[in-house]
Amino acid sequence: MKIIDASECIMGRLASSVAKSLLNGEEVHIINAENAVISGSKDMVFGEYISKRNLNHPRKGPYYPRMPHLMLKRAVRGMIPYQKPKGREAFKRLKVDVGTPLSLQKEKAETIENAKMNDSTKYIRLGDVSKNLGAKFNG
């Protein structure tokens, strides 16, 4: 099993490398999902997520997640063919957590170097986006 720390990683780049690992048959566990970042100004990122949530019908969908671990999982899902059997099996091998679970605290988590953000990048953390959308989580 591959354990990946999402802290200070750009969500899209992290999701694409995780999707590739899943399609290659690996089991992936992502920790600290609330510390992943989305590049761009705060107003632009908030505006995108709020407009996406307002496009849907509250009872009929499509339903967009508000919790940070589910937002990251949805980003990975968009990068695999989840409606086909191969993609569905790959998606079942993914686990995403807010924070670090007790069972994984002693394990060594790896980071994806090409997903790390620069110091000059405008960004906002996934946890802040979630709280702005109304999510209630401990993180």
Image (cartoon, rainbow, N blue to C red):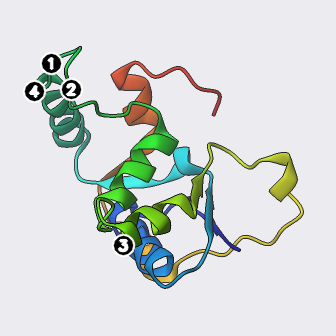
Circles 4 and 3, Cβ within 8 Å, touching? The answer is: no
Q: Residue at x 36, y 24 (%)?
A: 132
> Tag 3 or tag 4, which sits nearer the N-term?
3
In the drawing, does residue 75 fall left or right of residue 14? left
Whole-percent x, y for residue 23 in the image: 44, 79
Reading the image, the residue beneath label 4 is 55
Cα–Cα gap, marks 4 and 3 = 26 Å
- Quarter holding the N terminus is bottom right
Query: What amino acid is found at the position of numbered circle 1 in the picture?
Result: His
Reading the image, the residue beneath label 1 is 57
Q: Secondary structure at mark 1?
A: loop
Which one is closest to the eye, mark 3 or mark 1? 1
Q: Residues within 10 Å of mark 4 (few under 14, many from 20)?
A: few
Q: Secondary structure at mark 4?
A: loop
Reading the image, the residue beneath label 2 is 61
37 relative to 125, above or below: below
